[in-house]
Image: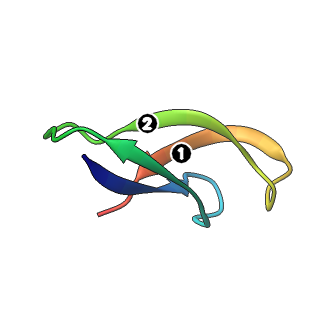
Amino acid sequence: MKKAALNCSVCGSRNYTVAKKDSIIRMELKKYCKTCDAHTIHKESL
């Protein structure tokens, strides 16, 4: 398994790292961003 960093789609800050299985598809999760103070979509960074 690899670790993937997640970036907030609104402000761009890296808030989370998650374990990810080998996959071509980029992960998208709805997570809490403390910079935006809201739940936003977080996308896997490259």
- Seen at 35% across and 55% down, the residue is 3
Q: Residue at x 61, y 67 (%)?
A: 13
Picture disc at residue 13: none
- Please state, as top left, top right, bottom left or bottom right, where the C terminus lies in the image: bottom left
Q: Compared with residue 8, is residue 29 higher up or lower down, i.e. above or below?
A: above
Residue 22 lies in what quarter of the image? top left
Q: Is residue 37 above or below residue 5?
A: above
Q: Is residue 34 left or right of residue 7?
A: right
Q: Number of marks in the image?
A: 2
The circle drawn on residue 42 is 1
Which tag, 1 or 2, sits closer to the chain's start?
2
Instruction: Tell which of 24 and 19 is nearer to you.
Output: 19
Asked if labels 2 and 1 touch by Cβ distance under 8 angstroms, the answer is yes
- Measured from the top left, where is residue 35 in percent x and y? 79, 62
Q: Amino acid at mark 1?
A: His
Report the residue that reaches farthest toward the front.
1
Residue at the right extreme of this rendering: 37
Q: Secondary structure at mark 1?
A: strand
Question: Which numbered disc covers residue 28?
Answer: 2
Q: Position of residue 39 (x, y in %)?
A: 74, 37
Residue at point 16% right, 38% down? 23
> With 30 as the anchor, is 5 left or right in this view?
left
Task: Measure the C-alpha gap from mark 1 to mark 2.
Answer: 6 Å
The residue nearer to you, when weighing 1 against 16, is 1
Kind of residue at disc 2: Glu
Residue situated furthest top in the rendering: 30
- In x, y percent, where is residue 27? 36, 38
What's the image's color scheme? Answer: rainbow
Q: Position of residue 2 (x, y in %)?
A: 27, 52
Q: Is residue 24 left or right of residue 20?
A: left
User: Which residue appears at 23% of the width and 38% of the height?
Assistant: 21
